[in-house]
Image: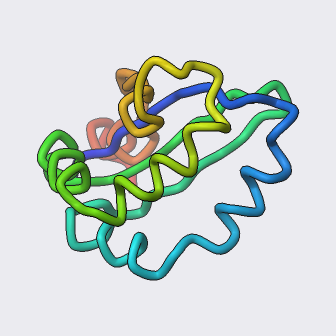
Amino acid sequence: MRRYCLVARIRPDRAEEYRARHAAVWPEMLQALHESGWRRYSLFLAPDGLLVGYVESEDLDAAQRAMAATAVNARWQAQMAEFFVSDDARPDEQFVRLDEVFDLADQREKAGLT
């Protein structure tokens, strides 16, 4: 399982509504994410609108393609679009992947620490 970090930006003035929408994600959306290969998916939101996502997946590209093919994702992305700073792409296409440069568990294992 690989770890991924994703960043995007939402409109800070819409942060509370964005939080509320994510406090009650549709069950069919949750199921589609799971069936598509998304694991341990979390979103973190800073006051300035910086949105940071963490997800584990065997293959995030495949998981994203699988989600893009679902009707529920199309409906969700259409509703979430108004929260994002850029209107150029669907919200799920605006995330930028960050390279992982440090993981404590990996480093401890390499150093022979338990």
How many numbered marks appear? 0
Find residue 33 and report its horizontal and vertical position in percent: 32, 65
Question: Which quadrant: the N terminus?
Answer: bottom left
In this rendering, position of residue 61 left or right of residue 114: left
Find residue 35 and report its horizontal and vertical position in percent: 22, 72
**Is residue 32 positioned above or below 63 on the image?**
below
In this rendering, position of residue 70 left or right of residue 40: left
**Is residue 34 positioned above or below 114 on the image?**
below
The one nearer the camera, 111 or 45, is 45
At x 24%, y 49%, the residue is 68
Question: Which quadrant: the C terminus?
Answer: bottom left
Residue 99: name its quadrant. Answer: top left
In this rendering, position of residue 42 left or right of residue 23: left
In this rendering, position of residue 27 left or right of residue 99: right
Find residue 9 and report its horizontal and vertical position in percent: 63, 26
At x 41%, y 25%, the residue is 89
At x 70%, y 69%, the residue is 23
Q: How is the image coloured?
A: rainbow
The one nearer the camera, 39 or 90, is 90
Find residue 36 and report its horizontal and vertical position in percent: 21, 63
At x 34%, y 78%, the residue is 31
**Is residue 111 positioned above or below 20 on the image?**
above
